[in-house]
Structures are given as structure tokens and as C-alpha cells.
Image (cartoon, rainbow, N blue to C red):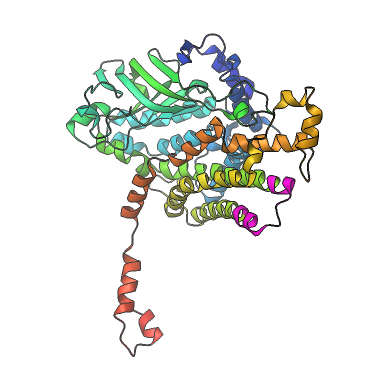
């Protein structure tokens, strides 16, 4: 089959019966018509339609054995292949201004990398290497979308899953039989869960490797329609307002959901790892999945920084504050953020090498630096919107006000130096939705914890970074003989 259209994506969602709950009610009927999901589903459909657009198809896809596939499934063998993947990912990210953190290319990148590392999974069971390759082929052939879930419920973070007061809260293995593995419990958090086709249940990276951790150690993927699989959603931040009033939330409200496994049977052909904490902990790094996923995330981060730059500079121009140095300094921070992320991407490509599985893999050092920097950077970018928009971000009457008897007041008193009132309000409502609304606040939280606890990430970064050369250089400097020449020093 290969690439599908937006209509194909929506049709499959509507025909698939999912167990989705929101606001105390089960979603009944076509999910594409439900007010909490219809707009973001339209946006997701737009991504798939870009693959079929003649103006973008060569950039967004590749052909293999006469079949056209989405470029996020492309197994890169050269740096040119990486660049092709990057351009496709950036196109999708730009479509949403970087506001969709779980567009399909994110998990497609992980699956692509894992599929080539069959030997890793075979260490656990010879069948599992075949399973991951077959699953990749299935997803690629049907161009399906995935959600995933990593984190266990936050009951008591001070002890392991097996030591919880109720050790059966976290998703765990309760039975193995001829058909497969039975999973019971819950996982947090599945972004886009109700609007995707499948769920990849990745292993937690916090497993201790003890016998007690075995029931919580697994990796598998199943359709979202699997009996016993249930999604419990938070409240929607798409309040049914117009694109004018809520320009981002009315398009890109991805939805986050808790995942319940009510004795879910996972067939053996969908199991990739089982009851091996060591292999589960090493899965992402050893297979190259982390590097490929982070490479995709950086395209989203660049698009997001550029989008924030566009919003901010538009505000500067609209209200005429570009001549002030403190304004220029703040906007420059956003420019630096975007350009820094671009530099990390180019560095990762320049130093890319094939991994042990033959997959061209972007260099990890710049990617690792980037993923530690952006969670701290993005809240500041949002703060700059707030600082420059100031009270203007609260004086934002909506579309209904513009079409009411008070329109003359709005046109007179909310005009900007370089924009009429309606255009100014449209811009400032976008700035508000990016920086202050429920949608915008969720984006900040999402970026802060995109890859996990930033303090734990920084600690891991510190412990994994080779600091010896820098330390040795300082020691050499402190111990230099008085009469040594530069050439003698450099030759050591």
C-alpha cells in the first residue's frame, strides 16, 4: 500500500472501535466528529496529505520496489539519506509551528532504528528479532500512526514498582500462555493515544534489574482497538472556539491520556522484549533509536523556535517597539535558540557514522547537548512573548466581539501602530495561545519534561561526558616547565 492520504487516516480511525473516555463519558460514534478530537484529527490528516501533494511528494517520500513510502520509514545508509529524512521532518514540523510533539515521524524514527537491530532483540528470544522487523514492515506498508507510553503511575516515587503498596498498579505481566502475554495495570502517558492506530509500550529506563522487576520489563506493540486497552483522557484544551480565537488549540490539541491494560492479551508476534531488565534498559541507546528520535525532535524544536521568533517579531513590528535595545536583546535570544539548534543538527550530520547495525546514525554528542538545552530554553522563549506582549496579551476581545455592535470601539481603541485592530487582535490571540492559554502552558510543561526529569538528564549527561581531556589539559598547563617551547608542549 505505502503512503496513505488524510482521508485514509480518518476513515481507519472512525472504523476502529476504541475504548476512549473523556469528561466522564465514553466516546461513541466516529471519533473524527467528537469535539475534543475532530480538529487535531484534521491537522493529522493534513500531514498525510502533504505526502501526496505533487509539490512535496518527492521531498516527503521515497520509492522502494515500486512502492512509495513515507520518508520517516527510510533506513538511512548515507548522510544524504539523513538529510532527506531531516527535510521531510522539518516540513511536517513547520506545518504545525512545532506545536505537535508526537507527529508520526517521531515514533517511526524509533521503529526504523529498532527494526534494523534484530540481533539485539534475539538475545532475549530468537523470535523477537523477527517480530520487530515484521512490525516495521507492517507499519511502513500501511503508513500507520503510533502513540507510545513509558512512565508508570506516580504512586510512590521513592520505591520500585514491586515495592509499591499495591504492586499491581503499574502495567505488568500477569500471565504467559500459548497465545501471548497478558498485561494488567496502567501506564502514563500516551500523547495522541486516541487519535493513533497503534501503541508501542516501551520499557521503562528505570528498571533496577532485580528478579522483582521482571514482570514490569517488556516491549511490545498492539492496535489501539485491542480488547481491554482503555484510554482515559485529560480535559481537552480545544474549547470549540474558532481558529481566530484559539489559533493553536483549535488545530493542534494532541491530547494526553492514561493507558489502562485490563488483562490485555499481547500476541507473541507483537512482543519484542520480555522479562529482561538489562536489555530493556539498553534498548533505546544500543539500537540507535534514541539518536534517531532526538534527530527528529530537533527539527520540531527548530520549527518551534522559528515560529516563536515569527510571533515575537510580528508583535515588535505591530506595536512599534523594535528601536528599543532591550527588545532587540530579547528577540536575539530567540534567534540564538533557533540557530543553536540548527548548528547541533548540522554537527550531528557532519559526524554521522553507521552504527553496528549498518544504519547511518547522527552523532550523539551534539544531539545529547541539544536535548539538554532546549527544555531549559523553551520556557524562556515563551517568557519573552509574555514580556513583549505585556498587557496586550490580556486585552484580546474575541471574534464574536468583532462581529457585534461594539466593533467600532474595538477598531478605534485596539488599533496598533502598524496594524488595524482586527489584525492586531488576531496576532495577539496567537501569542496568547502560544504563551498563556491552557494549550500554551501545556506546551511549556511538555518541553520541560520531553526527555524526562531535566535534573536527572543533566546528571546523566555529566556522568557520561568524557571530561578527562579537559582536566588533563589543565594539569599539563599547571605543570609546564618554565623554558618549554610551544612546539615541545604541543608535541606531548
Give x and y (percent) for residue 349.
Answer: 51, 53
Image quadrant where residue 96 sits = top right
Query: Can residue 55 be seen?
Result: no
Q: Quadrant of the C terminus?
A: bottom left
Q: Quadrant of the N terminus?
A: top right
Image quadrant where residue 103 sits = top right
Q: Tell me the residue at 64%/29% (across/down).
A: 246
- Predominant SS of the magenta segment: helix
Q: Tell me the residue at 54%/30% (across/down).
A: 438
Is 303 or 250 nearer to us in this picture? 250
Give above or below for 475 relative to 128. below
The magenta stretch is 315-331
Give x and y (percent) for residue 22.
Answer: 48, 16
Is 471 or 425 nearer to us in this picture? 425
Q: Residue furthest bottom?
A: 483
Image quadrant where residue 134 sits = top left
Query: Can residue 235 be seen?
Result: yes
Q: Give the left or right position of residue 233, taking residue 479 as reference.
A: right
Give x and y (percent) for residue 12.
Answer: 56, 17
Give x and y (percent) for residue 463.
Answer: 31, 53
Is 220 or 472 nearer to us in this picture? 472
Give above or below for 40 relative to 434. above
Amino acid at each position: 500500500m505505502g503512503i496513505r492520504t488524510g482521508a485514509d487516516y480518518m476513515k481507519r480511525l472512525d472504523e476502529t472501535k476504541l475504548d476512549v473516555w473523556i469528561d466522564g463519558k465514553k466516546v461513541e460514534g466516529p471519533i473524527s466528529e467528537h469535539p475534543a478530537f475532530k480538529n487535531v484529527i484534521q491537522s493529522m490528516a493534513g500531514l498525510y496529505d502533504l505526502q501526496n501533494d505533487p509539490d512535496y511528494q518527492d521531498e516527503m517520500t521515497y520509492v522502494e520496489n515500486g512502492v512509495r513510502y513515507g520518508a520517516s520509514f527510510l533506513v538511512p545508509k548515507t548522510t544524504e539519506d539523513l538529510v532527506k529524512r531531516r527535510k521531510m521532518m522539518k516540513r511536517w514540523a513547520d506545518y504545525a509551528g512545532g506545536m505537535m510533539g508526537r507527529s508520526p515521524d517521531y515514533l517511526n524514527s524509533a521503529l526504523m532504528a529498532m527494526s534494523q537491530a534484530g540481533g539485539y532483540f534475539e538475545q532475549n528470544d530468537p523470535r523477537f528479532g523477527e517480530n520487530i522487523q515484521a512490525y516495521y514492515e507492517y507499519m511502513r506498508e500501511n503508513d500507520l500512526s503510533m502513540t507510545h507510553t513509558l512512565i508508570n503511575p506516580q504512586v510512590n516515587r521513592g520505591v520500585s514498582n514491586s515495592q509499591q503498596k499495591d504492586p499491581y498498579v503499574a502495567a505488568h505481566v500477569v500471565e504467559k500462555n500459548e497465545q501471548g502475554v497478558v498485561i494488567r495495570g496502567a501506564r502514563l502517558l500516551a500523547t495522541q493515544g486516541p487519535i493513533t492506530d497503534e501503541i508501542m509500550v516501551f520499557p521503562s529506563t528505570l528498571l533496577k534489574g532485580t528478579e522483582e522487576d521482571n514482570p514490569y520489563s517488556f516491549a511490545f506493540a498492539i492496535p489501539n482497538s485491542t480488547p481491554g486497552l482503555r484510554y482515559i483522557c485529560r480535559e481537552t484544551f480545544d474549547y470549540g472556539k474558532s481558529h481566530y480565537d484559539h489559533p493553536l488549540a483549535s488545530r493542534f490539541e494532541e491530547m494526553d491520556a492514561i493507558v489502562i491494560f485490563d488483562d490485555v492479551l499481547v500476541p507473541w508476534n507483537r512482543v519484542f522484549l520480555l522479562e529482561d531488565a538489562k536489555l530493556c534498559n539498553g534498548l533505546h541507546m544500543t539500537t540507535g533509536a534514541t539518536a534517531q528520535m532526538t534527530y527528529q525532535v530537533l527539527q520540531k524544536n527548530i520549527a518551534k523556535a522559528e515560529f516563536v521568533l515569527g510571533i515575537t517579531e510580528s508583535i515588535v513590528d505591530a506595536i512599534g517597539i523594535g528601536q528599543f535595545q532591550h527588545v532587540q536583546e530579547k528577540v536575539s535570544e530567540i534567534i540564538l535558540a533557533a540557530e543553536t539548534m540548527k548548528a547541533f543538527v548540522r554537527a550531528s550530520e557532519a559526524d554521522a557514522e553507521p552504527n553496528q547495525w549498518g544504519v547511518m546514525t547522527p552523532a550523539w554528542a551534539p544531539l545529547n547537548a541539544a536535548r539538554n538545552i532546549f527544555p531549559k530554553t523553551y520556557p524562556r522563549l515563551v517568557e519573552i512573548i509574555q514580556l513583549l506582549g505585556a498587557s496586550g496579551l490580556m486585552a484580546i476581545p474575541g471574534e464574536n466581539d468583532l462581529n457585534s455592535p461594539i466593533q467600532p470601539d474595538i477598531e478605534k481603541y485596539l488599533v496598533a501602530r502598524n496594524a488595524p485592530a482586527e489584525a492586531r487582535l488576531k496576532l495577539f490571540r496567537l501569542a496568547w495561545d502560544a504563551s498563556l492559554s491552557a494549550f500554551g502552558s501545556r506546551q511549556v510543561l511538555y518541553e520541560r519534561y520531553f526527555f524526562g526529569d531535566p535534573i536527572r538528564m543533566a546528571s546523566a549527561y555529566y556522568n557520561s561526558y568524557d571530561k578527562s581531556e579537559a582536566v588533563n589539559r589543565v594539569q599539563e598547563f599547571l605543570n609546564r616547565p618554565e623554558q618549554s617551547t610551544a612546539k615541545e608542549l604541543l608535541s606531548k
